[in-house]
Amino acid sequence: GDLPGLDIGMRMAASLWRFWQQTGALREARQWLEDLLARGTDPGIGSARGRALIAAAGIAYWQTDLGRARDLYEEALDLYRGLGDRPGMADALNSLAGIPMMTGDLPLARQLAGQARDLWQELGDQWQAALATLTLGMSSLLEGGYEQALSYFEEFVPVVEMIGNGELLD
């Protein structure tokens, strides 16, 4: 197979999906990513495939195809686990948490976001840990746990303030 081409194609598609989301080209983007994913199962393109899976899942999510989004996020999580790629795992976990949050399985949403936050904290990424904390807060809020939600949101604020002060920029 054409591994270098597939690798580049997957990385490019993964980088462009937010642009396609903004420009309303989700159908074309999804077709391109799904085609690349169908062709690229070789272990040699592991991290590129993981990024493409997360991009394809994001597109499916925005198209409200939550079942497909969940499957793609779970495949990405398994792939990153197999690679020992902890940032990839954390990214997949926090993205995956959005699905049960939308479908009303709030304990599962909190469990996944909590795992993502723990991983990001271990990795020393305060911003990503804060985003996972925001997911925890939203899940608690939707469940009616207002005091718990407030404590999560209060954890988020200082990180945003640090970014505002330029303290988290490397």
Image (tube, rainbow, N blue to C red):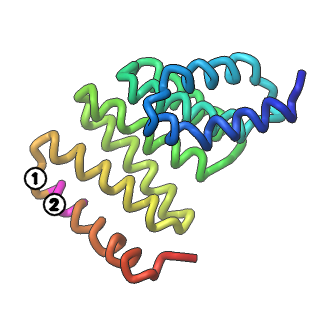
Q: Evaluate if marks 1 and 2 touch, with contact meaning CB atoms under 8 Å apart.
A: yes
Q: Which mark is residue 146?
A: 1
- Say how many tags the image has: 2
Q: Residue furthest right?
A: 1
129 to the left or right of 38: left
Please name the amino acid that badge 1 sits on: Tyr
Where does the magenta region start and end? 148-152
Residues 75 and 3: in front is: 3
Residue at numbered disc 2? 150
Residues 148 and 138: in front is: 138
Residue 134 versus residue 100 in the image, above or below: below
Dominant SS type (magenta):
helix
- The picture places residue 4, in percent across and down from the top left corner, at 86, 35
Q: Residue at image x 70%, y 40%?
A: 11
Q: Residue at image x 31%, y 75%?
A: 158
Disc 1/disc 2 C-alpha distance (Å): 6 Å
- The picture places residue 28, in percent across and down from the top left corner, at 55, 21
